[in-house]
Amino acid sequence: MFFSRIVRAQEVTLAILKPSVTSSPKSVQKILEKLDADENFNILAARKTEISASQAARFYAEHEGKFFYPRLQAYVRSGPVIALALQGDGVIANWRKLIGPTKVTKTKYLDPGTLRHDFGVSDTRNSFHGSDALQSAQSELSILFPDLRFDPENPKYYDIDIPDVISRIESDALKIEDLKYPPPNPQITKNYSTDLDSIPLAKEDFWDGYHRKQKQDWFLNQNKALEFIKRHTKIADNERKDKITVLDLGAGTSTLILRIIFMMKNIDGWAIDFSEEACKFQANSVETLLENYSKKTGDAESLLVKNGNSLVICKDDCRSLTCADHSVDVIVDKGTMDAFMRLEESESFQAMDEMARVLAPGGSILQLTEEPPETRLERWFKWSQSTKYEAKIQQEEILGKFGYIVTLSEREQ
């Protein structure tokens, strides 16, 4: 799809709506309506397209060799994008002001009213692009709008050459409804996040409503999560004699902790969540699993007892945990800290303080998150500077998300 018209502009910039926002037609419509109502922006050309490997390489050439370069490419190619050639006085600065800073986790509470505040997912999946200067605008526009030509005698003015059939479109022919399209193929976008368009991840009533409707893990395939935990702990070693205490921080409607206590041995499990609905789900699931085991085997003895396991299900806030000091060997966090990263920094620090308090010496915190290293590691570093703990962190990538293995040790005085 390609729309454009002949015009001479004082300044032009490239704006891109990236896959995490284009996956929601309602979000696209809201954004285009916002542009249409703002006199600072005139849409010269628009196209819905998929970025090729060669285009992505040209687009992010300046970042080649950096640790986040593969993720930038993977993200922008994970689904369709909408590219816009915008014209207006000071349009480069105006568009960048509208979308907000690239650090989405800070934007969420420092820059309300910006597009990244409303639609951004993480620092890598920040949902929008805007050229940062006239020269980069020229280069980037040439990648996605090759018919747009620049006047060499006056680089602040442009001539747009359009095929005759397009050039006859009336000046008001570009309508928002022209850019509507069916939802993308879920096989393309399924690994890149739930539609997180500004959902209130840190609010109890949101999760109560969510868990009433959705009886599945919202964040990551549970088998992949279990494989990650088994790789970095000894829970799967059924020959060991010592108990391991596993805390599922924000259990939700995931069956992860249930799989651990029914498949492994010598496990004391904790499933905590501040949603009443999530706790009910966990309790009902345990009861159902035990009943099914008893009927299938005819064994009256609980499978939990047979495996030497236990499970505590608790409605709890991770800023004030019920667990005793230094009582937990493995803390599993599947996106829970992502919610706290959207709040004031002090609130995420409270949750991190509590994890440090309950973690046993030699224990580990396993985090599965949308947050890339430049965001999550920075937060751990800042927290560490304010406490007596030194945090050591390993990382890996899992289905387009990030896994962090955090160990804490007391800093020498």
Image (spheres, rainbow, N blue to C red):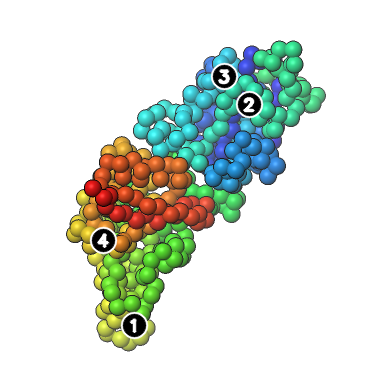
How far is disc 1 from disc 3 in space, using C-alphas? 69 Å
Between label 1 and label 3, give the one nearer the viewer: 3
How far is disc 3 from disc 4 in space, using C-alphas? 54 Å
Which mark is first along the chain, 3 or 1?
A: 3
Which mark is first along the chain, 3 or 2?
A: 3
Q: Quadrant of residue 130?
A: top right
How far is disc 2 from disc 3 in space, using C-alphas? 13 Å
Looking at the picture, how far across and down is residue 380, in whole percent?
Answer: 35, 45
Looking at the picture, how far across and down is residue 342, in whole percent?
Answer: 36, 40
Q: Give the labeled residue for mark 2.
A: 136
How far is disc 4 from disc 1 in space, using C-alphas? 38 Å
Q: Residues within 10 Å of mark 2 (few under 14, many from 20)?
A: some
The kind of secondary structure element at disc 2 is helix
Which mark is first along the chain, 4 or 3?
A: 3
Between label 2 and label 3, give the one nearer the viewer: 2
Q: Give the labeled residue for mark 1.
A: 295
Query: For the residue marked with disc 3, what is the amino acid?
Result: Val
Q: Quadrant of residue 197?
A: top left
Q: Give the labeled residue for mark 4.
A: 360
Between label 4 and label 2, give the one nearer the viewer: 4
